[in-house]
Image: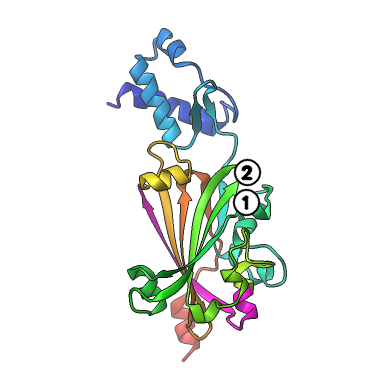
Amino acid sequence: MAPKWRELADRFAEQIRSGEIKPGAQLPQIRDLVAAGEGSKDTVHKAYKELEAQGLVTSSRGHGTVVRQQQPLKRLGIARYDKAKWRDGDEVAFIADRVASGRSYRRNEQTQTVSRVKASAAVAAAHGLPEGADVYARARVVKEGTQPTHTLTSYYRPEHVEGTRIVDPTPGPAGRGGGFRVLYDAGYEIDHMTEELFARVPTAEEAQLLQLALGEWVVELHRTTYTADGTVVEFAIELHAATRFAWSYDFKVPDSAKAEGESK
């Protein structure tokens, strides 16, 4: 049998997800629920903390417990990298997500720090370099208004980006079309990628940077970007606040048996 705090949390969660309790609505004060026989102060507090951990509510002194206003951002899969967006226009990946979600954006909602660093084991392996080799790290924090949504650090070989806008520390995307357009103009047209996703508990520093609620997890994404001849031109590590994104993928289902038969 589920503990009482879990039953209470599940009931409120269902009411929030169904729309019975609207975004922006304030949940009852803890003392009022205690008086109504919903459990002890500790029981109600645990239930509210669970709702906060699920990303359904926010709690603050003076404002109580309030249902989140925003639905999660639609984090596009393949479509966010459409060449027409950044090669022919100015829609970098995080802006593509905002457009798909019907949300506003400003280019300066992306900060930037560029530095030359020693490659970690993961970065070195992705680029086929010895561990400790010099690479450029372009680190960004992306926000929606004042709230961070994710961090993104791209690692490049110096010979691919030296003297380009990618290593310019000016905040915001690296000029029109962002980093992929810079690589394209330098003769490195991106062709295909691999992405790996990992869910994990954030470090204390990551929780503070992303302004995460207690118990909220992160989704870490590793992206390796290649040219048509297999050259790795970017390895990126992204860290997303798990409750602030809904991951969306739209792709053609492969049929390897059919493809093999047609090649004979």
Residue 38 lies in magenta, yes or no?
no
Q: Residue at x 61, y 75 (%)?
A: 164
Q: Which residue is mark 1?
A: 109
Q: Earlier in the sequence, mark 2 or mark 1?
A: 1
Helix, strand, or loop for circle 2?
Answer: loop
Residue 231 location, x and y as percent?
A: 48, 82
Residue 94 location, x and y as percent?
A: 60, 57
Q: How many marks?
A: 2
Q: Which residue is mark 2?
A: 145
Q: Residues within 10 Å of mark 2 (few under 14, many from 20)?
A: few
Q: Residue at x 44, y 16 (%)?
A: 30
Horizontal side of residue 3 vs 84, given as left or right: left
Residue 91 location, x and y as percent?
A: 67, 62
Magenta stretch bounds: 182-201
Report whether residue 182 is seen. Answer: yes
C-alpha gap between disc 2 and disc 1: 7 Å
